[in-house]
Image: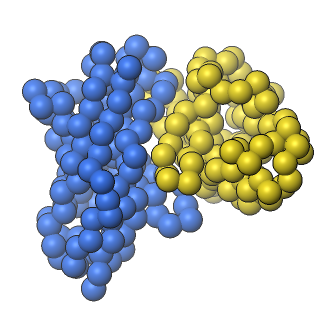
Amino acid sequence: DTAVSQTPKYLVTQMGNDKSIKCEQNLGHDTMYWYKQDSKKFLKIMFSYNNKELIINETVPNRFSPKSPDKAHLNLHINSLELGDSAVYFCASSPRSGEQYFGPGTRLTVT
Amino acid sequence: GDSVTQMEGPVTLSEEAFLTINCTYTATGYPSLFWYVQYPGEGLQLLLKATKADDKGSNKGFEATYRKETTSFHLEKGSVQVSDSAVYFCALSDQNTGFQKLVFGTGTRLLVSP
């Protein structure tokens, strides 16, 4: 059973398009996260949600909008995609204040 | 703000060699410290953690000790295998953010040859 799953695994799209990445966790955790890993492997948090409530927003452009329909899901919608958005996006979940479990990642390529 | 500094890679070793990957941190509170591993094409997996000074985290032959006096959390393994080839990330989370934000180092790639 996959603990934290993401779809799609790969996403290739053109500049200006709007796309979504979905994340689901079956661990019963309260907190979910989105991280971005750039081409140099540097990882940085984008958002965290605790029980469907936004807790952390790390100065991410407004084009990125997370949505949490329930505490098992945290989706990431990106408007007007730019070349610089190309990266690997990781979803993660944790119990409150606990260790984080990561999904397999979604590689986004904007052409 | 909080930060983590890791040694530059890649680290290239022969099988059965001793591994050390250095990690130092800066934090305003009392952080928890982690090592994550990322195998090629995969997500991150928690390797080990330590939540207070002098704690030693260990897993799969890897060890790291939380040293508050030197603000370090160096990763060690006595005898590496080819299957240990991966990127290793040191990270911290801080009570100031409710331990809800991981701050990562830049990652260190380990290459182990037979």
Quarter of the figure with residue A29 = top right
Q: Residue at x 70, y 44 (%)?
A: A85
Q: Quadrant of the C terminus of chain B?
A: bottom left
Quarter of the figure with residue B61 = bottom left
Q: Residue at x 45, y 17 (%)?
A: B97
* Chain A visual colour: yellow
Q: Describe residue B56's horizontal placement relative to residue A46 as left or right.
A: left
Q: Residue furthest bottom?
A: B114
Q: Residue furthest right?
A: A17
Q: Residue at x 37, y 42 (%)?
A: B105
Q: Residue furthest left?
A: B69
Q: Locate residue B51, reporting x and y percent.
A: 27, 30
Q: Locate residue B3, reporting x and y percent.
A: 35, 30
Choose between A51 and A104: the one closer to the eye: A104
Q: Is residue A36 visible?
A: yes
Q: Describe residue A40's horizontal placement relative to residue A48 as left or right.
A: left
Q: Quadrant of the N terminus of chain B?
A: top left
Quarter of the figure with residue B10 = bottom left
Q: Locate residue A80, reporting x and y percent.
A: 85, 38
Which chain's colour is blue? B
Choose between A37 and B61: the one closer to the eye: A37
